[in-house]
């Protein structure tokens, strides 16, 4: 308690108090008394004021220039953005025009079965009864080990992989589906389901879970045939082994869009050249 009392009563160390008293007695404390010292102090104050004033003036002069450059940059960004939007709209318009011409070409060259050709190629939107199959990642995607995939590591988890969707789609085709779309992406005979890192790509377009598969066909028969197929049992095994979530339901009407891009390919048999003696291999040229 005596130490605390001393600290409270004498907050300044006695040595500091003695040094301050000694400076006052020697005349070294307070403002400078000689003319030279006063002039030095005044010069220092003037120099400091000049530096501060000069900095403020330069900042004031530079501010409009910086603001003008910023406005010009914003205007350039807006102009380039508008140009890019215009070009993107033109590209989309041309893409739609090309797709429409391709669809008409398929219908024209399909003859009496032009409608069927357009349907099978995905050239036209379709609607009708069918099923809705939803496949989603497991809530805990860190599971792994064994299971129907017969592998270990990153691919053997509760995450839906591209090969899983390949088997689902192939199973639906084999079960009698007339048209299929995944997350609104229409599948054709040329569609590819692949992986890029963790993402599943359908015709180079990334999809995000849950994966909603719509298939046109006899809903009841299609659902039963898919459940009994090897691919349907594979999907069920994924659910049991990795908790991948699945649901399938019959739909009175589903609507599938047309394929976004079609590549029309034609082939004709090559006529045998009897003059040159070339053998007819029976292969076509495209």
Image: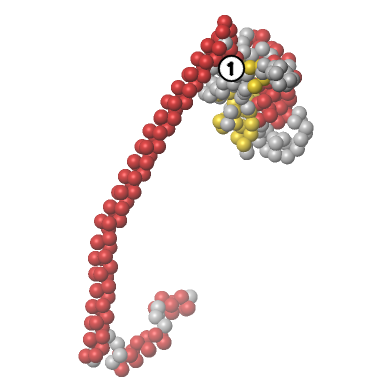
Q: Is residue 252 visible?
A: no
The quarter of the image holding the C terminus is top right
Residue 78 picture quarter: top left
Q: Residue at x 51, y 19 (%)?
A: 102
Q: Is residue 140 left or right of residue 277?
A: left
Q: Is residue 83 visible?
A: yes
Between 123 and 233, the one nearer to me in the picture: 123
The spot of residue 272 in percent (x, y) is: 70, 17
Is residue 191 depicted above or below 31 in this figure?
above
The residue at the far top in this view is 112
The spot of residue 162 in percent (x, y) is: 66, 30
The spot of residue 178 in percent (x, y) is: 62, 13
Between 65 and 141, the one nearer to me in the picture: 65
The spot of residue 113 in percent (x, y) is: 58, 7
Q: Dot 1, how many residues are within 10 Å of its Cα: few (below 14), some (14-19), or many (20+)?
A: many
Q: Is residue 140 left or right of residue 70?
A: right
Between 204 and 146, the one nearer to me in the picture: 204
Q: Residue at x 42, y 26 (%)?
A: 93
Name the element at disc 1: helix
Q: Residue at x 63, y 27 (%)?
A: 192
The residue at the far front in this view is 275
Q: Residue at x 28, y 52 (%)?
A: 68
Residue that badge 1 annotates: 121
Badge count: 1
Colour scheme shown: secondary structure
Is residue 184 depicted above or below 22 in this figure?
above
Residue 166 picture quarter: top right
């Amino acid at each position: 308690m005596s130490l605390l009392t001393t600290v409270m009563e004498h907050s300044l160390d006695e040595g500091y108090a003695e040094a301050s008293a000694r400076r006052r007695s020697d005349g070294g404390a307070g403002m400078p008394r000689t003319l030279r010292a006063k002039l030095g102090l005044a010069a220092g104050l003037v120099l400091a004021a000049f530096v501060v004033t000069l900095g403020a003036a330069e900042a004031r002069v530079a501010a409009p220039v910086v603001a003008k450059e910023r406005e010009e940059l914003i205007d350039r960004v807006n102009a380039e953005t508008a140009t890019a939007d215009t070009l993107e709209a033109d590209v989309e318009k041309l893409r739609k025009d090309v797709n429409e011409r391709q669809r008409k070409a398929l219908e024209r060259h399909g003859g009496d079965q032009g409608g069927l050709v357009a349907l099978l190629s995905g050239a036209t939107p379709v609607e009708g009864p069918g099923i809705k199959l939803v496949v989603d990642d497991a809530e805990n995607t860190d599971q792994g080990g064994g299971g129907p995939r017969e592998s270990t590591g990153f691919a053997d988890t509760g995450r839906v992989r591209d090969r899983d969707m390949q088997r689902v789609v192939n199973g639906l085709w084999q079960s009698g589906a007339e048209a299929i779309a995944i997350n609104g992406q229409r599948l054709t005979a040329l569609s590819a389901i692949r992986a890029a890192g963790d993402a599943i790509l359908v015709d180079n377009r990334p999809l995000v879970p849950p994966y909603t598969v719509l298939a046109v066909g006899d809903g009841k028969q299609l659902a039963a045939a898919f459940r009994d197929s090897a691919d349907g049992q594979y999907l069920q095994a994924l659910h049991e082994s990795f908790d991948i979530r699945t649901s399938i339901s019959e739909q009175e009407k589903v609507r599938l869009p047309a394929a976004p891009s079609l590549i029309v390919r034609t082939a004709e048999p090559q006529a045998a050249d009897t003059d040159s003696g070339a053998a007819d291999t029976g292969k076509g040229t495209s």
